[in-house]
Amino acid sequence: MIQKEFVIHRADINNHCPNCFSARGMVFSFIQRQKENSWIILTSRNIQEQLFCQHCHQEVYPGTWNDAIERVYLYQKKCFTAKPAGLKLKKKAIKVLGLTFLTLASVLGFWVMIQNGFL
């Protein structure tokens, strides 16, 4: 299975970095994962949040956030909608399932006709 990550929402913020104290370069990213093969696409419900400082090139973990960063995080979390989680069938899978259902229905119909004496 191929795993893909999609950045659902990206926001540049002007808070001070707890590591380097730079006022610019902080980026919130909200990421959703998706697994895909030739039959299905499976979208995860979980959303990964990441705060990255582009000035010092380090990820800022939630334990080091101050109240201002926490408030911006809660606001940015409300600003996007995630892709719907679940399972999506590709055309190939739909065709195979349709053909299987059609074959089973015709075999069942043929069996009923034989049992009732129509053939």
Image (cartoon, rainbow, N blue to C red):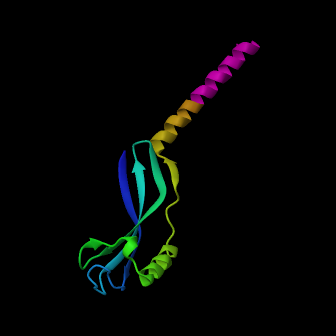
Residue name at image x 67 percent, y 17 percent: 111
Residue name at image x 36 percent, y 55 percent: 4
Asked if 5 appears above or below 76 in the picture, the reply is above
Q: Tell me residue 22's x, y (percent).
A: 28, 85
Please state the extent of the stretch shown in magenta in the rendering: 102-119
Assess whether residue 116 is covered by the magenta stretch.
yes
Q: Tell me residue 52's x, y (percent).
A: 32, 73
Q: Tell me residue 55's x, y (percent).
A: 24, 80
Asked if 41 appears above or below 79 in the picture, the reply is above
Asked if 116 appears above or below 1 in the picture, the reply is above
Residue closest to the eye, 66 or 36? 66
The answer to whether residue 118 shows anywhere in this view is: no
Magenta part, dominant SS: helix
Asked if 6 appears above or below 77 in the picture, the reply is above
Q: Tell me residue 6's x, y (percent).
A: 39, 62
In this picture, residue 40 sits left or right of residue 27: right
Residue closest to the eye, 112 or 73? 73
Quadrant housing residue 116? top right
